[in-house]
Image (cartoon, rainbow, N blue to C red):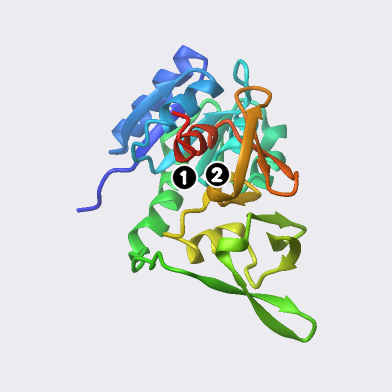
């Protein structure tokens, strides 16, 4: 028997929240949390509990659903829920699994849940990665050279390219930051933003940023903003909490 999907709902309108929660439970989903604003999403995610998908209202107090996704420390399957169809394009630009218009119907929700369940049912567990010294290839002219991960401060994703930062900037063979994160699993890196993968050991200082974010300072003076969602994990890795 397939395990029920664990769902977090963020919705500031009580009637819409109750309706969506009822429909999801009728579809044999487990509601792990109901929050009414963007900060509430991060507060719950910081507990570290398992969740299979986030159903986010786009217009909420404080932070919109789009703002929440931009600040997530790692990718989650996202379903946007809104009364305004003009938000659809921006929703799919954020790589949302689906976009639901209010009032949500059981028939339309069933299609969304089918999309969410498909990859889960066919996924295979990955083998654990070793944690010893590690090198990875980057492009150099017509060939490749190997960089030491211990001398790398961070990885960024820009213009369809994953760049490694190790004194200079080097083009890796990975095509997405999620691909890099998977290849480097078990190596201690932290997804600090949608486009940033950080090695906490390379951080030499931190300061407070805006809206609950923090700014990490690396050797050489480079400063990188760490998202609200990833800030608690980085503080913990640095022994600050």
Q: Is residue 42 left or right of residue 221?
A: left
Per the model, the C-alpha gap separating discs 2 and 1 is 6 Å
Give the left or right position of residue 125, taking residue 37 as reference. left
Image check: 50 left or right of 184? Answer: left
Q: Residue at x 24, y 52 (%)?
A: 2
| Left or right: 47 in relation to 231 | left
Circles 2 and 1, Cβ within 8 Å, touching? The answer is: yes
**Residue 112, numbered circle:** 1
Residue lying farthest to the top in this orientation: 14
Residue 51: give x, y in percent of width and height: 37, 40
Label number found at residue 38? none
Q: Position of residue 212 (x, y in %)?
A: 60, 24
Split into 4 quadrants, where in the image is the C terminus? top left
Q: Residue extending furthest right?
A: 141
Label 1 Cα neighbours within 10 Å, binned few <14 / some 14-19 / many ≥20? some
For residue 85, what is the image quadrant? top right
Choose between 204 and 156: the one closer to the eye: 204
Please, is residue 80 above or below residue 76 in the view? above
**Rendered view: 18 above or below 192:** above
Residue that label 2 marks: 98
Q: Which is more N-terminal, label 1 or label 2?
A: 2
Query: How far across and how far down the image is residue 147, in percent?
Result: 63, 72
Give the x, y percent position of residue 221.
75, 44
Residues packed near mark 2 inside 10 Å, few (<14), some (14 to 19) or many (20 plus):
many
Residue closer to the observer: 107 or 143: 143
Question: Who's the residue at 46% across and 45% down the image?
Answer: 112
Quadrant of residue 161 in the image? bottom right
Q: Secondary structure at mark 2?
A: strand
Q: Residue at x 41, y 45 (%)?
A: 113
Q: How many marks?
A: 2
Instruction: Depth check: give the residue in front, 170 or 35.
Output: 170
């Amino acid at each position: 028997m397939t395990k029920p999907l664990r769902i977090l709902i963020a919705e500031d309108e009580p009637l819409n929240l109750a309706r969506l929660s009822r429909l999801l439970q009728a579809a044999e989903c487990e509601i792990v949390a109901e929050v009414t604003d963007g900060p509430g999403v991060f507060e719950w995610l910081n507990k570290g509990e398992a969740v299979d998908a986030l159903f986010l209202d786009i217009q909420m107090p404080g932070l919109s659903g789009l703002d929440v996704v931009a600040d997530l420390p790692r990718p989650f399957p996202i379903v946007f829920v809104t009364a305004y169809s003009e938000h659809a394009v921006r929703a799919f630009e954020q790589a949302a699994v689906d976009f639901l218009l209010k009032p949500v119907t059981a028939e339309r929700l069933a299609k969304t849940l089918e999309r969410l369940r498909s990859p889960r049912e066919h996924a295979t567990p990955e083998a654990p990665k070793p944690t010893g010294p590690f090198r990875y290839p980057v492009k150099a002219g017509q060939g490749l050279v190997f960089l030491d991960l211990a001398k790398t401060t961070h990885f960024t994703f820009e213009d369809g390219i994953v760049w490694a930062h190790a004194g200079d900037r080097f083009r890796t063979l990975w095509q997405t930051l999620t691909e890099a994160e998977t290849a480097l699993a078990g190596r201690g890196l932290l997804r600090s933003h949608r486009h940033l993968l950080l090695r906490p050991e390379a951080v030499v200082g931190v300061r407070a940023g805006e809206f609950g974010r923090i700014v990490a300072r690396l050797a050489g003076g480079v400063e990188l903003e760490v998202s609200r969602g990833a800030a608690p994990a980085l503080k913990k890795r640095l022994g600050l909490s």
